[in-house]
Amino acid sequence: MPEFKEVYIERYKKLLGEEWEIFKEAILKPFPPAFRINTLKAHREQILESIKEWPIAEVPFYKDGFYFTQKKGFVVGNTLEHFLGYIYIQEVASMIPAVVLNPKEHEKILDMAAAPGSKTTQMAQMMNNRGAIVAGEKLLNRLSSLRINLQRCGVRNCILSYMDGRAFKTLDMQFDKILLDAPCTGTGTIMKSLHTIKTWSVTASKMASNLQKQLLNSAVHVLKPGGTLVYSTCSLEPEENEENVDYAVRKLGLKTEQINLTGFKTRPGITSWEGKEFDNSVKNCIRIYPQDNNTEGFFVTKLVKES
Protein backbone atom coordinates (compact mmCIF):
# COMPACT_ATOMS: atom_id res chain seq x y z
CA MET A 1 0.00 0.00 0.00
CA PRO A 2 1.37 3.47 -0.87
CA GLU A 3 2.27 5.79 1.97
CA PHE A 4 0.07 8.86 2.31
CA LYS A 5 1.56 12.17 3.43
CA GLU A 6 0.38 13.19 6.87
CA VAL A 7 -0.86 16.54 5.57
CA TYR A 8 -2.96 14.68 2.99
CA ILE A 9 -4.51 12.41 5.63
CA GLU A 10 -5.36 15.34 7.89
CA ARG A 11 -6.83 17.28 4.99
CA TYR A 12 -9.17 14.48 3.94
CA LYS A 13 -10.19 13.78 7.50
CA LYS A 14 -11.32 17.43 7.60
CA LEU A 15 -13.23 17.00 4.36
CA LEU A 16 -14.77 13.61 5.07
CA GLY A 17 -14.61 12.98 8.81
CA GLU A 18 -15.29 9.33 9.60
CA GLU A 19 -15.47 8.51 5.89
CA TRP A 20 -11.72 8.90 5.47
CA GLU A 21 -11.09 5.14 5.70
CA ILE A 22 -13.87 4.38 3.20
CA PHE A 23 -12.48 7.01 0.85
CA LYS A 24 -8.93 5.63 1.17
CA GLU A 25 -10.15 2.14 0.35
CA ALA A 26 -12.05 3.43 -2.69
CA ILE A 27 -9.11 5.32 -4.22
CA LEU A 28 -6.80 2.33 -3.91
CA LYS A 29 -8.92 -0.06 -5.95
CA PRO A 30 -9.64 0.01 -9.70
CA PHE A 31 -13.05 1.19 -10.87
CA PRO A 32 -15.06 -0.41 -13.71
CA PRO A 33 -13.94 0.55 -17.23
CA ALA A 34 -16.41 2.79 -19.03
CA PHE A 35 -16.96 4.13 -22.52
CA ARG A 36 -19.28 6.14 -24.75
CA ILE A 37 -20.81 4.92 -27.96
CA ASN A 38 -20.09 7.33 -30.81
CA THR A 39 -23.11 7.97 -33.02
CA LEU A 40 -21.04 10.20 -35.33
CA LYS A 41 -19.53 7.03 -36.82
CA ALA A 42 -22.45 4.59 -36.74
CA HIS A 43 -26.08 4.28 -35.69
CA ARG A 44 -26.71 3.59 -32.03
CA GLU A 45 -28.47 0.28 -32.81
CA GLN A 46 -25.56 -0.87 -34.98
CA ILE A 47 -23.03 -0.23 -32.22
CA LEU A 48 -25.15 -1.85 -29.53
CA GLU A 49 -25.61 -4.92 -31.71
CA SER A 50 -21.85 -5.12 -32.19
CA ILE A 51 -21.19 -5.11 -28.42
CA LYS A 52 -24.25 -7.07 -27.30
CA GLU A 53 -22.12 -9.77 -25.66
CA TRP A 54 -20.31 -7.28 -23.43
CA PRO A 55 -21.42 -7.28 -19.75
CA ILE A 56 -22.35 -3.61 -19.55
CA ALA A 57 -24.93 -1.26 -18.04
CA GLU A 58 -26.02 2.20 -19.10
CA VAL A 59 -24.71 5.24 -17.23
CA PRO A 60 -27.81 6.57 -15.41
CA PHE A 61 -27.46 10.23 -16.40
CA TYR A 62 -26.23 9.78 -20.00
CA LYS A 63 -27.81 7.37 -22.49
CA ASP A 64 -24.69 7.00 -24.63
CA GLY A 65 -22.43 6.13 -21.68
CA PHE A 66 -21.81 2.58 -20.47
CA TYR A 67 -19.71 0.83 -17.82
CA PHE A 68 -18.70 -2.80 -17.36
CA THR A 69 -20.63 -4.74 -14.73
CA GLN A 70 -17.96 -7.42 -14.48
CA LYS A 71 -14.36 -7.94 -15.52
CA LYS A 72 -13.94 -8.72 -19.17
CA GLY A 73 -11.22 -10.89 -20.62
CA PHE A 74 -10.05 -8.33 -23.17
CA VAL A 75 -8.68 -4.80 -23.24
CA VAL A 76 -11.37 -2.43 -24.51
CA GLY A 77 -8.74 -0.29 -26.24
CA ASN A 78 -7.77 -3.29 -28.39
CA THR A 79 -11.26 -3.91 -29.74
CA LEU A 80 -12.31 -3.29 -33.33
CA GLU A 81 -15.08 -0.98 -32.10
CA HIS A 82 -12.48 1.25 -30.46
CA PHE A 83 -10.19 1.35 -33.50
CA LEU A 84 -13.12 2.22 -35.76
CA GLY A 85 -14.19 5.05 -33.46
CA TYR A 86 -17.54 3.39 -32.65
CA ILE A 87 -16.71 3.76 -28.96
CA TYR A 88 -14.59 6.17 -26.94
CA ILE A 89 -13.07 5.03 -23.66
CA GLN A 90 -14.00 7.56 -20.99
CA GLU A 91 -14.49 7.36 -17.24
CA VAL A 92 -18.07 7.85 -16.02
CA ALA A 93 -17.42 11.00 -13.96
CA SER A 94 -15.56 12.54 -16.89
CA MET A 95 -18.78 12.44 -18.93
CA ILE A 96 -20.55 14.81 -16.53
CA PRO A 97 -19.15 18.25 -17.57
CA ALA A 98 -20.37 17.98 -21.18
CA VAL A 99 -23.75 16.71 -20.00
CA VAL A 100 -24.07 19.72 -17.68
CA LEU A 101 -22.97 22.15 -20.40
CA ASN A 102 -25.52 20.60 -22.79
CA PRO A 103 -24.20 22.07 -26.07
CA LYS A 104 -26.74 22.59 -28.86
CA GLU A 105 -26.45 22.24 -32.64
CA HIS A 106 -26.65 25.97 -33.35
CA GLU A 107 -24.16 27.11 -30.70
CA LYS A 108 -20.53 28.22 -30.68
CA ILE A 109 -18.62 26.36 -27.97
CA LEU A 110 -15.15 26.94 -26.53
CA ASP A 111 -13.32 23.98 -25.01
CA MET A 112 -10.49 25.84 -23.28
CA ALA A 113 -8.24 22.92 -22.30
CA ALA A 114 -9.39 20.25 -24.71
CA ALA A 115 -6.70 17.55 -25.03
CA PRO A 116 -6.89 14.62 -25.29
CA GLY A 117 -10.43 15.21 -26.54
CA SER A 118 -12.76 13.11 -24.38
CA LYS A 119 -15.18 15.95 -23.74
CA THR A 120 -14.58 17.60 -27.13
CA THR A 121 -15.66 14.48 -29.01
CA GLN A 122 -18.56 14.01 -26.60
CA MET A 123 -19.80 17.56 -27.24
CA ALA A 124 -19.43 17.15 -31.01
CA GLN A 125 -21.61 14.06 -30.81
CA MET A 126 -24.21 15.90 -28.70
CA MET A 127 -24.24 18.62 -31.37
CA ASN A 128 -24.55 16.11 -34.25
CA ASN A 129 -21.44 17.64 -35.81
CA ARG A 130 -23.23 20.97 -36.22
CA GLY A 131 -22.53 24.38 -34.74
CA ALA A 132 -18.86 25.00 -33.97
CA ILE A 133 -16.36 24.00 -31.30
CA VAL A 134 -13.06 25.78 -30.81
CA ALA A 135 -10.76 23.37 -28.98
CA GLY A 136 -7.76 24.97 -27.35
CA GLU A 137 -4.52 23.34 -26.23
CA LYS A 138 -1.18 24.95 -25.38
CA LEU A 139 1.07 21.86 -25.58
CA LEU A 140 1.95 20.64 -29.05
CA ASN A 141 2.22 16.94 -28.16
CA ARG A 142 -1.21 17.03 -26.51
CA LEU A 143 -2.61 18.90 -29.50
CA SER A 144 -1.53 15.96 -31.67
CA SER A 145 -3.40 13.47 -29.49
CA LEU A 146 -6.47 15.71 -29.62
CA ARG A 147 -6.31 15.84 -33.43
CA ILE A 148 -6.01 12.05 -33.67
CA ASN A 149 -9.03 11.49 -31.41
CA LEU A 150 -11.14 13.99 -33.34
CA GLN A 151 -10.28 12.24 -36.61
CA ARG A 152 -10.94 8.76 -35.21
CA CYS A 153 -14.34 9.84 -33.92
CA GLY A 154 -15.40 11.56 -37.14
CA VAL A 155 -15.65 15.06 -35.65
CA ARG A 156 -16.16 17.74 -38.33
CA ASN A 157 -17.41 20.80 -36.42
CA CYS A 158 -14.20 21.50 -34.49
CA ILE A 159 -11.41 24.05 -34.99
CA LEU A 160 -8.11 23.36 -33.24
CA SER A 161 -6.35 26.24 -31.53
CA TYR A 162 -2.70 25.98 -30.48
CA MET A 163 -3.06 28.53 -27.71
CA ASP A 164 -2.75 28.97 -23.97
CA GLY A 165 -6.27 29.33 -22.57
CA ARG A 166 -5.25 32.52 -20.77
CA ALA A 167 -4.78 34.21 -24.16
CA PHE A 168 -8.37 33.76 -25.35
CA LYS A 169 -9.38 36.96 -23.59
CA THR A 170 -7.31 38.92 -26.13
CA LEU A 171 -9.44 37.70 -29.04
CA ASP A 172 -12.44 39.46 -30.51
CA MET A 173 -14.69 36.40 -30.13
CA GLN A 174 -17.84 35.50 -28.23
CA PHE A 175 -19.07 32.01 -27.35
CA ASP A 176 -22.50 30.77 -26.34
CA LYS A 177 -21.01 28.26 -23.92
CA ILE A 178 -17.58 27.44 -22.55
CA LEU A 179 -16.16 24.28 -21.03
CA LEU A 180 -13.18 24.80 -18.75
CA ASP A 181 -12.05 21.37 -17.64
CA ALA A 182 -9.11 22.95 -15.93
CA PRO A 183 -5.57 21.63 -15.49
CA CYS A 184 -5.35 20.46 -11.88
CA THR A 185 -3.44 18.30 -9.42
CA GLY A 186 -5.60 15.27 -10.29
CA THR A 187 -6.25 14.07 -6.75
CA GLY A 188 -9.58 12.59 -7.85
CA THR A 189 -7.77 10.15 -10.12
CA ILE A 190 -5.27 8.62 -7.70
CA MET A 191 -6.57 5.13 -8.52
CA LYS A 192 -5.23 5.60 -12.07
CA SER A 193 -1.92 7.07 -10.98
CA LEU A 194 -0.70 6.26 -7.47
CA HIS A 195 2.28 8.52 -8.20
CA THR A 196 -0.07 11.46 -7.51
CA ILE A 197 0.09 10.57 -3.81
CA LYS A 198 3.80 11.43 -3.86
CA THR A 199 3.66 14.49 -6.09
CA TRP A 200 0.67 16.25 -4.51
CA SER A 201 1.24 19.08 -2.04
CA VAL A 202 -0.71 22.04 -0.69
CA THR A 203 1.68 24.27 -2.60
CA ALA A 204 0.89 22.42 -5.83
CA SER A 205 -2.84 22.96 -5.25
CA LYS A 206 -2.32 26.67 -4.59
CA MET A 207 -0.25 27.03 -7.78
CA ALA A 208 -2.95 25.21 -9.75
CA SER A 209 -5.59 27.45 -8.18
CA ASN A 210 -3.78 30.55 -9.38
CA LEU A 211 -3.64 29.25 -12.96
CA GLN A 212 -7.30 28.20 -12.82
CA LYS A 213 -8.38 31.69 -11.73
CA GLN A 214 -6.48 33.15 -14.71
CA LEU A 215 -8.29 30.75 -17.03
CA LEU A 216 -11.66 31.68 -15.52
CA ASN A 217 -10.85 35.35 -16.01
CA SER A 218 -10.01 34.69 -19.65
CA ALA A 219 -13.21 32.69 -20.17
CA VAL A 220 -15.46 35.48 -18.88
CA HIS A 221 -14.09 37.88 -21.52
CA VAL A 222 -15.23 35.68 -24.41
CA LEU A 223 -18.50 34.37 -22.93
CA LYS A 224 -21.65 35.98 -24.28
CA PRO A 225 -23.99 37.72 -21.83
CA GLY A 226 -26.45 35.05 -20.72
CA GLY A 227 -23.93 32.35 -21.67
CA THR A 228 -23.00 29.29 -19.64
CA LEU A 229 -19.57 28.29 -18.35
CA VAL A 230 -19.00 24.83 -16.91
CA TYR A 231 -15.91 24.66 -14.70
CA SER A 232 -14.65 21.22 -13.72
CA THR A 233 -11.58 19.48 -12.34
CA CYS A 234 -10.57 15.91 -11.52
CA SER A 235 -9.26 17.30 -8.22
CA LEU A 236 -10.96 17.25 -4.82
CA GLU A 237 -8.95 20.12 -3.34
CA PRO A 238 -11.04 23.11 -2.15
CA GLU A 239 -8.36 25.55 -3.35
CA GLU A 240 -8.89 24.31 -6.91
CA ASN A 241 -12.65 24.08 -6.67
CA GLU A 242 -14.88 26.06 -4.30
CA GLU A 243 -12.27 28.78 -3.83
CA ASN A 244 -12.26 29.37 -7.59
CA VAL A 245 -16.04 29.34 -7.84
CA ASP A 246 -16.15 31.89 -5.03
CA TYR A 247 -13.72 34.00 -7.10
CA ALA A 248 -15.92 33.61 -10.20
CA VAL A 249 -18.99 34.75 -8.26
CA ARG A 250 -17.49 37.60 -6.22
CA LYS A 251 -14.88 38.94 -8.64
CA LEU A 252 -16.14 37.99 -12.09
CA GLY A 253 -19.87 38.45 -11.53
CA LEU A 254 -20.95 34.94 -12.51
CA LYS A 255 -23.83 33.07 -10.88
CA THR A 256 -23.97 29.37 -10.03
CA GLU A 257 -26.84 27.15 -11.07
CA GLN A 258 -27.97 23.88 -9.54
CA ILE A 259 -26.96 20.60 -11.17
CA ASN A 260 -29.15 17.49 -11.12
CA LEU A 261 -27.92 14.09 -12.28
CA THR A 262 -30.39 11.22 -12.41
CA GLY A 263 -29.40 8.11 -10.47
CA PHE A 264 -25.94 9.35 -9.54
CA LYS A 265 -24.83 10.44 -6.08
CA THR A 266 -23.32 13.90 -5.76
CA ARG A 267 -22.52 16.11 -2.79
CA PRO A 268 -22.78 19.91 -2.58
CA GLY A 269 -19.77 22.19 -2.57
CA ILE A 270 -18.35 23.13 0.81
CA THR A 271 -18.89 26.71 2.00
CA SER A 272 -15.74 27.14 4.09
CA TRP A 273 -12.22 25.79 4.22
CA GLU A 274 -9.32 26.52 6.59
CA GLY A 275 -10.63 29.88 7.73
CA LYS A 276 -12.00 31.00 4.35
CA GLU A 277 -15.74 31.55 3.95
CA PHE A 278 -17.05 31.06 0.43
CA ASP A 279 -20.15 32.52 -1.18
CA ASN A 280 -23.12 30.40 -0.11
CA SER A 281 -23.98 29.64 -3.74
CA VAL A 282 -21.04 27.23 -3.98
CA LYS A 283 -23.53 24.73 -2.56
CA ASN A 284 -24.78 24.44 -6.15
CA CYS A 285 -21.46 22.88 -7.17
CA ILE A 286 -21.19 19.11 -7.08
CA ARG A 287 -18.48 16.99 -5.53
CA ILE A 288 -18.15 13.41 -6.75
CA TYR A 289 -16.29 11.10 -4.39
CA PRO A 290 -14.93 7.70 -5.51
CA GLN A 291 -16.76 5.82 -2.74
CA ASP A 292 -20.17 7.14 -3.79
CA ASN A 293 -20.43 5.72 -7.33
CA ASN A 294 -17.24 3.68 -7.81
CA THR A 295 -15.83 6.33 -10.15
CA GLU A 296 -13.06 8.88 -10.21
CA GLY A 297 -13.35 11.90 -7.96
CA PHE A 298 -14.58 15.02 -9.75
CA PHE A 299 -15.83 18.56 -9.19
CA VAL A 300 -18.29 20.32 -11.50
CA THR A 301 -20.04 23.68 -11.37
CA LYS A 302 -22.37 25.48 -13.77
CA LEU A 303 -21.84 29.23 -13.99
CA VAL A 304 -23.94 31.77 -15.90
CA LYS A 305 -22.97 35.25 -17.07
CA GLU A 306 -25.72 37.79 -16.52
CA SER A 307 -27.34 39.28 -19.61
Image (cartoon, rainbow, N blue to C red):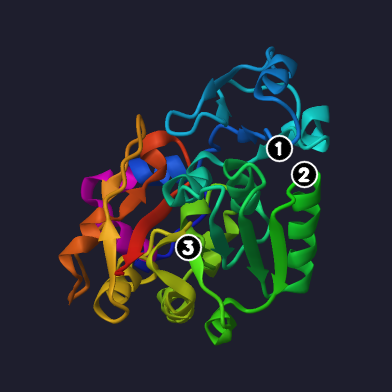
| Label 1 SS | loop
Residue 154 disc label: 2
Residue 52: where, in percent of width, then height?
68, 13
- The residue where tag 1 is placed is 40
Q: Residue at x 44, y 59 (%)?
A: 232
Q: Is residue 21 visible?
A: yes
The span picked out in magenta is 8-21
In the rendered view, does 213 fall on the left or right side of 172? left
Q: Nearer the viewer, residue 105 or 112?
A: 105
Q: Amino acid at mark 3?
A: Asp
Q: Residue at x 62, y 35 (%)?
A: 36
Q: Say which label, 1 or 2, has the lower sequence index.
A: 1
Give the alpha-carbon distance from disc 2 to disc 3, as whole Å.
23 Å
Q: Position of residue 269 (x, y in %)?
A: 26, 57
Name the chief secondary structure element in magenta. Answer: helix
Question: Which residue was labeled with disc 3?
Answer: 176
**Number of other residues with Cα within 10 Å of mark 2, as a class: few under 14, some 14 to 19, many 20 or more:** many
Q: Amino acid at mark 2?
A: Gly
Residue in view at x 35 percent, y 32 percent: 262
The furthest residue to the front: 106
What amino acid type is highlighted by mark number 1? Leu
